[in-house]
Amino acid sequence: MSAFVYGSLLAPEVLHALLGRVPKQSKASLSGYKRYSIKQRPYPGIIRDSDSVVLGEVLHDLTREDQDILDEFEDIRSGYYAKTAASVVLQESQETFNTEVYVYCSQSDLYGDWSYESFREEHLEDYVEMCKQFKQVYLEDLGLLSEMPNRPRPENP
């Protein structure tokens, strides 16, 4: 499984916090979409725009668990983002590659361009901590926290 990413998931630190690893990546472009900043959020959203291209990366070899974590993180159940089939062009080979992408669902919250460099400088440290907390709550909700390797288990009082 794979996913095209274009915002905060470009940061290896964010991927590691969420997935416990950084999957293999390929630089790619997605035609027919435009990336925007989202009001009061450090991450972007994309929407259809026939005249635009979004640069990003394809994450390869995602497991079902990786996909589940990313789907929950992108909040697709509540309709914040929609997972959509997409064809991207891989930068190195110029081949078309079929994958999925998270498309933002509320155009009214979008404005201006989003900058990965600004995200890294202004938000990355706090964002990574938020991602670690998200993953912990996600695993607790699934009852899997005690199965994580190298995590101390709480003592019984």
Image (spheres, rainbow, N blue to C red):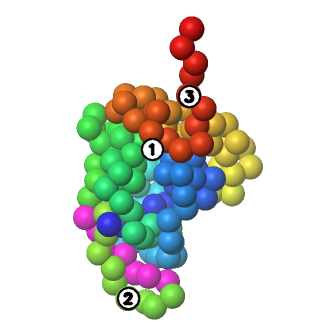
Image quarter hosting the N terminus: bottom left
Callout 2: few (<14), some (14-19), or many (20+) C-alpha neighbours within 10 Å?
Answer: few
- In the image, 116 versus 128, the foreground residue is 128
Task: Give whichever of discs 1 and 3 has the lower sequence position.
Answer: 1
Residue under pointer 3: 153
Amino acid type indicated by mark 2:
Glu
Q: Give the range drawn in magenta.
A: 85-91
Q: Is the magenta stretch mostly helix, strand or loop?
A: strand
Query: Residue 79, relative to residue 153: is it above or below?
Result: below
Residue 102 lies, in percent from the top left, at: 35, 54
Mark 2 or mark 3, which is nearer the start of the sequence?
A: 2
Mark 1: give few (<14), some (14-19) or many (20+) Cα within 10 Å. many
Q: Is residue 32 visible?
A: no
- Please name the residue shown 45% across and 61% down the image: 5
Q: Mark 1 points at which residue?
A: 110
Residue type, numbered disc 1: Leu
Q: Label 3 amino acid?
A: Arg
Q: Is residue 146 above or below residue 88?
A: above
Q: Nearer the viewer, mark 1 or mark 2?
A: 2
Front residue of 24/41: it is 24
Q: In this view, does 153 lie to the left or right of 52?
A: right
